[in-house]
Amino acid sequence: MDDQAASPLTVILVAAAFTAILVGATVYLLTPKGGEEAWIVQPQAEPPAFVVAKAPAGATWEDVRVELRNAGGTDRTADYLQLPTGRVQEGQVLQLPDGLPAGYYVLRLLDGERELARAVLHT
């Protein structure tokens, strides 16, 4: 018998510890960090608009990039949205124009490439 070989109990304990470290690291990496709060934007059918339901305290419209894309993926932000300035406030409405062509529109709020919120409106 080889005195150098690890016992089955040792192998199990090492594997369990290694698994615990991997699971802990994964949970840590997927958990929002301090200061990151949720954004929630909800579609409103009549009149067509998007309503800010939740935003981090102190956030401003200059902090986020707003995209409004139609079903074809074309960015229509400049055509259909007049963005507010200043602080983002819960209950704030991003109004779409009357006569908006029928279809699906996706509103995305971004911080760089990271998506903060998404809402879909069908008119």
Image (cartoon, grey):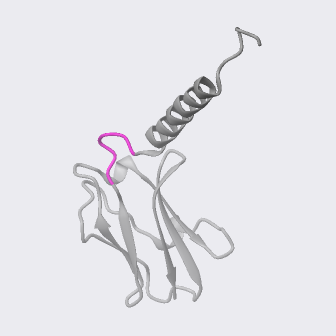
Q: Which residue does the image show at 24% across and 71% down from the upper left? A: 91
Of 33 and 119, which appears nearest the observer?
33
Quarter of the image where one finds residue 75 = bottom right
Q: Which residue does the image show at 66% across and 68% down from the upper left? A: 73
Tally the numbered discs: 0
Quarter of the image where one finds residue 11 = top right
Q: Which residue does the image show at 50% across and 35% down from the upper left? A: 20
Going by the image, does 91 lie left or right of 118? Answer: left
Of 21 and 112, which appears nearest the observer?
21
Residue 81 coordinates in the image, percent (x, y): 44, 70
Q: Residue furthest right?
A: 1
Going by the image, does 76 lie left or right of 28? Answer: right
Q: Residue furthest front?
A: 1
Please say whether residue 36 is one of the residues in the magenta stretch: yes
Q: Main secondary structure of the magenta part?
A: loop
Going by the image, does 3 lie left or right of 52? Answer: right
Residue 52 coordinates in the image, percent (x, y): 32, 68
Q: Is residue 101 above or below residue 108?
A: below
Please say whether residue 122 is one of the residues in the magenta stretch: no
Residue 83 coordinates in the image, percent (x, y): 38, 63
Q: Residue furthest top?
A: 3
Residue 13 coordinates in the image, percent (x, y): 55, 28
Of 89 and 10, which appears nearest the observer?
10
Q: Which residues are magenta?
A: 32-37
Q: Is residue 55 above or below residue 69?
A: above
Q: Quadrant of the N terminus?
A: top right
